[in-house]
Image: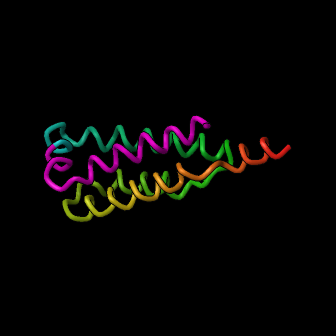
Amino acid sequence: MSVSRILKWVTGAFEAFLAIPLIGGAFIISLYWTPLLVMLILHIITLVLTKKDEGKSVGSILGIITSCVGWIPVVGMIMHILSAIFLMVNASQPDNKSVRNTAA
């Protein structure tokens, strides 16, 4: 399993945690929105590694957008849910580069 797929699982799990209605919002607010900045950095790193591995980057791009609008109460929760779903679906699929290496 590539590093980009592992990071997709990790960021997807974090996004799922942040999507929990009262707990995720309280966590973000109690830490002065720092988790959104940390997630933005993690999503950018995941996107770069995913592009390197020729994997699907929809989840990481959606995560970057979510980190930017996550401070809006209801919109943030919906975006965290969508990001978690897309990241975990993308993480469950092999990257194009790893598929090509096993076929050769």
Residue at 67 percent of width and 42 percent of height? 52
Residue at 41 percent of width and 58 percent of height? 85
From the image, which quarter does the C terminus lie in? top right
Residue at 46 percent of width and 52 percent of height? 88
- Look at the image and give the residue range highlighted in magenta: 1-26
Coloured how?
rainbow
Q: Position of residue 5 (x, y in %)?
A: 55, 42
Q: Nearer the viewer, residue 66 or 100?
A: 100
Q: Nearer the viewer, residue 67 or 91?
A: 91
**Residue at the extreme front of the image, as rendered:** 103
Q: Position of residue 64 (x, y in %)?
A: 43, 52
Q: Assign the magenta stretch its main secondary structure.
A: helix
Seen in the image, is 48 located left or right of residue 15? right
Residue 58 falls within the magenta-colored stretch: no
Q: How many marks?
A: 0
Q: Position of residue 68 (x, y in %)?
A: 35, 53
Residue 3 falls within the magenta-colored stretch: yes
From the image, which quarter does the N terminus lie in? top right
Q: Position of residue 29 (x, y in %)?
A: 16, 44
Residue at 71 percent of width and 50 percent of height? 96
Q: Nearer the viewer, residue 89 or 61?
A: 89
Asked if 82 appears above or below 99 in the picture, the reply is: below
